[in-house]
Amino acid sequence: MTNSLRAPYDGVVIAAPVTIPYVRYSIESAQWWIGRALNALVAQAGIKASDIDGLCVSSFTMGTDSGVGLTQHFGLCVRWLDTIPLGGASAIAGLRKAARAVQARDADIVACVAGDTNHVDSFRLTLENFSRFNQDAVYPYGAGGANSSFALIARNYMRTFGVTREDVGKIAVAQRANALRNPHALMKAPLTMEQYLAARPISDPIHLFDCVMPCAGAEAFLVMRDETAASLGLPAARLLSTIERHNAFADDPMQVRGGWAMDVGELYAMAGVKPDDLDIVQTYDDYPIITMMQFEDLGFCRKGEGAAFVRQHDLTIDGDFPHNTSGGQLSVGQAGAAGAYLGLVEGLRQVLGTAGTTQVRNASLALASGFGMINYDRGLASGAAILAGPSR
Amino acid sequence: MIDPIKPPRRKNPLLRTRLPASPPRARSRTSHGFTRAAAEGRFMLQRCDACGSFAYPAREACPSCLSSDLPFVDAPRRGLLLAETTARVPSDVYFRERAPWRIGLVKMDCGPTIVAHLHGDCVEGAAVRMSLQLDKSGQAVAFAHPEGETPNMSDDKQYREMTADPKFRRVLVTNGRTVIGQEAVAALKAAGAKTVFVGVAEPWRPFAGENLLRGQDGIEIVTLDAADEKSATDLAADVGGKVDILVNTTEYVRPGGLLDRRGTSIARDEIDQAYLGFINLAQAFGPAMRMRGADGINSSSAWVNILSVYALANWPAFGAYSASQAACLSFSHCLRAELRPGGVKVMNLFTGPVDTEWFQTVPPPKVAPRAIAQAIVSGLKAGLEEMYVGDVAEEIRQRLAANPKALERELDR
């Protein structure tokens, strides 16, 4: 079935989805949030901290720490370590590396963790110090941050493909409906299309409900081989395929597609499934327009048909295309690098059948994607993974 | 279309003066290639010496061929505005106070795409002309203008943040006894300055050109001897809060260098007049100017020095004068750093010998005082930091860049 030259992820599984409930502002440090996630991982998996022999960490607000400082901080002795500063693509990238590590037996149990704090000035400091191109050539221009950068992309995309704000809003409104079933979502009030359209402009055409709310929180999961999971009696999902791409389509004058479009064939071929087979899809939703772009680039419709696809489908938990079932970053909140993990961790819960109030019935095949690092004029990093639950 | 700015009303002295904030200032070292270009009003980009492609933002290696030979060169200014947005709730104090703020993405005809501040008349999908400007933190930024002239173009709200346009501003010209001073007054008045204060030492003593200044609408003769600390302080106490632009026209030219002079008395005069005069002016007027950098239409905006180009390379025939000018140049950089938090620019105009009596024996070409006055106005309108006025100054600049030793030897004759 597969034409891929890449080695399959035979025997690689993911277990113990952990979410440390988010708060809008926290006086704690990123290390505190990451520590809580590790503690929850160990408790959920029924293992000892000393059983963790691989660690993969992502965070924007750890200050001068990297993964190695955290090993001493948390008393971990690992033989495999990675720190992944890829923003919204960190979870997929981390999963890919961890999967190969356990497959090659460089490690047996890898803890993948992302966590960030949010002090009152954290977000501004992150914007100001994001990257060199951002510092030199973006931030001094109105200091609108990601909102202004994505506004330019959104405006061009909407004009090019005849997309209306209502089309984009349908994604945000559906996610809010999902979030109302997730007790951990920061957004607790229903959102109507009228409210979405009437929201105040932030950086045209980006309005308030196109933006995520920065917050503090952490997400984590374990990557191991199936026999390890079996010996621990841990329910686990199989990793079927992944893709990752950086700085794709550099010659496009403006971003109308992400790196997924370059590798999507391989994503499905390696997994041996078709887009139609998926039970749930968790896209990286820093802005709903980016989600619409992913519906195209991940093969659910053709380029330019994202708006029509959204019009034709119900994206809620009980709909015909369950999408961002936890409410996504748009309604749960964006806890820095943990935002990259949100969809993957929720997708893992879904295929394990442990998503509780947001559970999609009989979900066994999930896709989660990541997108990140708007270094200058476009998001550079993209990735996706397909997971299969025990029932498949 | 831009609405013309209106003359500011008289300031209510009971209201708090809004303090200046600076836009984001951090830049990579390589990025200061743009700062150099902006200081002189040039539009430069990096172009790869190996493959010829232009790159942006500032890079250390060519994204087309990985060569590290990426010099900044003058680049074509035309581009297409692909998309725009209006930032309404920026995270930074400077922009938040000035929101809504319009930016866009420009695809340059020569290749790169540039995030730029937009002039109000730029239209999405239409051609734009790019410039590099120094913003209120003194750093270079890309600015997109409409391709052709539009009405009230320089009154654009975002562009005016980048310039020190004399329109509706109040200017102090420090020495009205000189022809340069008198020409500067006339040019600044013609450029729309509301009031030009003209400093004259011992104004009861008649001087040539007095009739050009006295009794003219919007021109006020004030008593000022810049070399006298008390005189500078007294004048600042009187009009210091109303000086939006200060044009330092101090002129003290004497021939001679070291060995053919006896003692230090002439050198002391040169230092008193040019260097200590500069210090007196800076200490008297600088602090208030720095406070008033965001004070509305007639906020303080610039300090102008007229310096000899021989501040950059000593001309032995006027060796001591050259040294006094070099001292002023050095201190102007200090002043620039100290006025920077107020968003007040320091513009240095370098000139060759001027067509005045103290350069009587020097052969042409010499700079006409009117050319200096016009350069002051055009530099303020463009928001520049360095200007070379006249052929001699421009030649010295190029020769200094080409080979400073050759210039040193050849100035000795």
Image: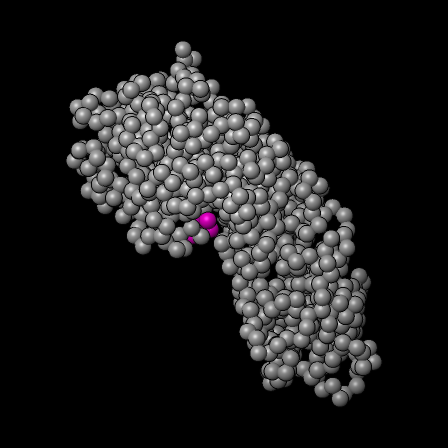
Residue B240 point in image, percent of width and height: 62, 78
Residue A231 point in image, percent of width and height: 17, 23
Nearer to me, B311 or B403: B311
Residue A163 point in image, percent of width and height: 59, 34
**Could you tell me how many numbered marks the image carries?**
0
Q: Is residue A191 above or below residue B192?
A: above
Nearer to me, A13 or B52: A13
Q: In what quadrant of the picture does the C terminus of chain B appear?
A: bottom right
Q: Is residue A29 above or below residue A386?
A: below
Q: Main secondary structure of the magenta part?
A: helix
Look at 76% across and 48% down and name the residue there: B148
Q: Quadrant of residue B233?
A: bottom right
Nearer to me, B217 or A79: B217
Residue B280 point in image, percent of width and height: 59, 78
Does residue A222 show up magenta in the picture? no
Nearer to me, A109 or B185: A109
Q: Is residue A180 visible?
A: yes
- Residue at the top extreme, as displayed: A1
Q: Is residue A84 visible?
A: no
Q: Quadrant of residue B323?
A: bottom right
Look at 61% across and 31% down and name the residue there: A161
- Residue at the bottom extreme, as displayed: B204
Look at 58% across and 63% down and name the residue there: B343
Give the magenta-colored segment's residue range: A125-129
Q: Is residue A138 above or below residue A293?
A: below
Q: Is residue B136 left or right of residue B412?
A: left
Q: Is residue B194 above or below residue A244?
A: below
User: What's the coloring here?
Assistant: one colour
Look at 32% across and 26% down and name the residue there: A351
